[in-house]
Image (cartoon, rainbow, N blue to C red):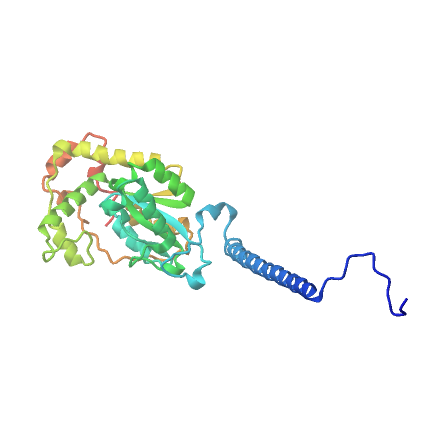
Amino acid sequence: MHPFSLKSSKGAPILPRPVFVFFVALFGFYVCYLSFNQITLENKREGNSGEEQRENICRKPYVPYDELRYVHFPKPTSYSRGECSCTPVRFFVIVSMQRSGSGWFETLLNSHPNISSNGEIFNRVNRRENISSILQTLDKLYNLDWLTSAAKNECTAAFGLKWMLNQGILENHDDIVSYLNKKGVSVIFLFRRNTLRRVISVLANDYDKDAKQLNGTHKSHVHSKEEADILAKFKPELDTSTLIANIRNIEKAIRDCLDHFKSTRHMILYYEDIIGNSNALSQVQEFLRVPVRPLMSRQVKIHTRPLPDLVKNWKDVSSKLNGTDFAHFLDGSDYDT
């Protein structure tokens, strides 16, 4: 035997060099692929963890547990909240009736730097055609994508609207209550105790829609005493044959509304309270969980005179209401000018 000869191996034959190189390259590619996926997965998890961490940072330090359902961190699509993305937002709705002081009340709220109330969103019929259109409108509003002159956008802390009883809220109350509770929306009920004064204000406003007493324009709200005096000159004549039924219908609508929405987080406020109670507006701000500060409005009251000076047929009205459950409206002592 040749001195350099070797005995044949009993194992598998050695692979040719090209095949060996191919398998080494394939193995290296597989290792790189796994490593890349691992890095991507870790980055994704880290990103998700960062978002969750930011959410926790936004929620935990200053929001009591029982308040969490009423606190939101909207992510509007039309703009970025930027440095205020962690500013919690509370949703609200003002439920009222025309000529109940809601316009004045809303201007008071909007004088607060952290409150945005966006008017009668549902005065447009197409937004309240059915419950689907109502909920779609509310979703857009409460995502802070509803842009009005009242919207403070980035750093708003309380965001809402004004909703009149004749704008679909009573007809769809079951679905709306469910939505408000699920969304964590607080409700501010604003009505007038003296329904007679509201009836007078409605009639006077309806008259001006046609008469346009202020230089040919109609104004539901005014900002000067001169304009208020012009509008207050008109004295409506009340239909005494339907007056009591009208007042009863108004008060029934209010009772029904309060009953339908009693399961919501809410407060009940009266126009007369805002005028006569210096703490009323502070209580509203505390209810909305915003810093309490003085609120201002440029609106000027129109009908500030005693009731007998506001109605053309006052004697007939007084005679009709005397001796009824509504006789206390004639006193007018609940209205402080």
Q: Nearer the viewer, residue 299 or 260?
A: 260
Task: Decide if residue 265 is in sight here.
Answer: no
In the image shown, does 301 or 45 lie closer to the viewer?
45
Compare residues 54 and 266 and report the one nearer the observer: 54
Looking at this view, name the residue that lies furthest to the front.
Answer: 1
Placement of the N terminus among the 4 image quadrants:
bottom right
Image position, residue 75 (x, y; %): 42, 56
Quarter holding residue 84: bottom left
Q: Nearer the viewer, residue 328 or 225?
A: 225
Residue 10, x across and y down, in percent:
83, 56
Residue extending farthest top: 323
Residue 185, x across and y down, in percent: 39, 45
Q: Is residue 209 left or right of residue 158?
A: left
Classify residue 317 as left or right of residue 157: left
Asked if residue 303 can be seen in this view, the reply is yes
Q: Position of residue 289 (x, y in %)?
A: 42, 52
**In the displayed structure, would residue 18 be above or below residue 238?**
below
In the image, is residue 169 above or below residue 111? above
Q: How many marks?
A: 0
The residue depicted at 36 percent of the width and 53 percent of the height is 159
305 relative to 87 in the view: left or right = left
